[in-house]
Amino acid sequence: MKVLFLTLLNLEDLTKNGIYHDFVNELSSRGHDVSVVCPSEKRFGGETKLIETNSIDVLKVLIGDITQTSYIKKGINTLLIESKYEKAINTYFKDKKFDLIIYTTPPITFNNLVLKLKKKNNAKTYLLLKDIFPQNAVDLGIFSKNSPIYKLFRFKEKQLYKISDYVGGMSVGNIDFIKSHNEIHSKTQVIRNALYELDYRIDDSIDKTSLFNKYDIDSNKKIFLYGGNIGAPQGIPFIKSVMSRFNEVEDGFLLIVGSGTHSNELIKHAKYLNYSNVKVMSKLPKEEYDQLVMLSDIGLIFLDHRFTIPNYPSRLTSLLNAKKPILMATDVNTDIKDDIIKHKCGLWSESTDVDLFIKNAVRMTNEDLSQYGENSYKLYLDEFKIENNIDKLLKLINE
């Protein structure tokens, strides 16, 4: 089967790990001919070019800036991507015929391109739902439901569902949400934010003491690690409140690592607090971040309390794989909390309740966390391995 994969994530190096890297690599390993189209942002010196990585053709397309820029600029450039992708595909893949078109959200603006490719190739179309936009932007107050920009993006979202033969959502909550708010005729299934299994055990060749010293971490405390995007979706005011009261978690060490629109705000707040058990670091290379996952005792998940959509952060997968207990503070609508509670992988509080979060953190410093960790790993093996999720996807398509 010839597969075209459209995404806004840079997949220039498919020897790396990640939910999209592992997705296309696993499809390719099954003998399918996979071609990828991904962006090359102007501010990074981008250009349109066709390369081969891990025996997969990757078409990088020059686009305007869509990361670390204003919402207005991001919105305009996102709307322009579709025509740029279409031109590049017609130039570099003009002699290829595709059986399956797979595309992800974000963005929701590929509907015209997907429809043209579907008709031209007589192909099946599969939407990987990784984001429910524009409702998430409304939830965060970026624009209102009465604004022209919302109505434009909402129209495109509806069209994208209409042309999709299949929709894979991150959770049951994702699928239920779009079905309750849209006319969905696609075949649907849960496709997790799945990854290949990695070994997060610290072996004898790794000097733990030197790692603790390298990152200036107190090895006598249980490490609570948050890693990933630091922006509005994570609920920055709540995180700052947690930081301000983390001195109450006497046997805990709060470590936040990442980048995003609000990362400097958290770095400044940590400096202002000057607590010995709170540290905020900029984004690290994956190899170094994985070392911190190995050293940590508890993985953190944060989501803004205003969300009405069931967000499902991808960072959970590596924490489950690494056998980490989970401490999370989210809105009440996401079903990520339901999965963690059901499978007894950790503790949850609403991301308005700082008191309960701190209480849960203190509780975890005083508990044997091994059973939480084993439950996390079992959930990873049962639902979050990429091999099993590709099995499910191919089974649905072949029915």
Image (tube, rainbow, N blue to C red):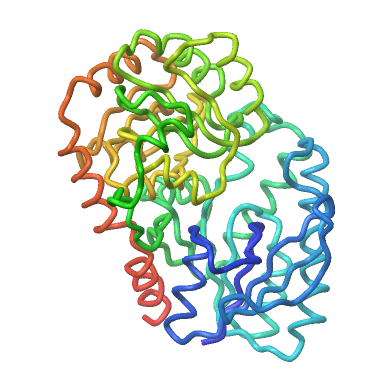
The picture places residue 283, in percent across and down from the top left corner, at 59, 39
Say which of 322 and 220 sits in front.
220
Residue displayed at 79% across by 55% down: 41
Q: Quadrant of residue 30?
A: bottom left
Q: Quadrant of the C terminus?
A: bottom left
Say which of 254 and 221 sits in front.
221
**267 versus 176 height, above or below:** above
Residue displayed at 56% across by 85% down: 2
**83 versus 364 height, above or below:** below
Say which of 299 and 66 sits in front.
299
Residue displayed at 56% across by 30% down: 281
Would you say 310 lies left or right of 201 here? right
Residue displayed at 77% across by 44% down: 75
Q: Quadrant of residue 387?
A: bottom left
Q: Quadrant of residue 365?
A: top left
Say which of 159 and 364 sits in front.
364
Total residue callouts: 0
The picture places residue 231, in percent across and down from the top left corner, at 61, 31
The picture places residue 185, in percent across and down from the top left corner, at 49, 64
The picture places residue 263, in percent across and down from the top left corner, at 62, 28
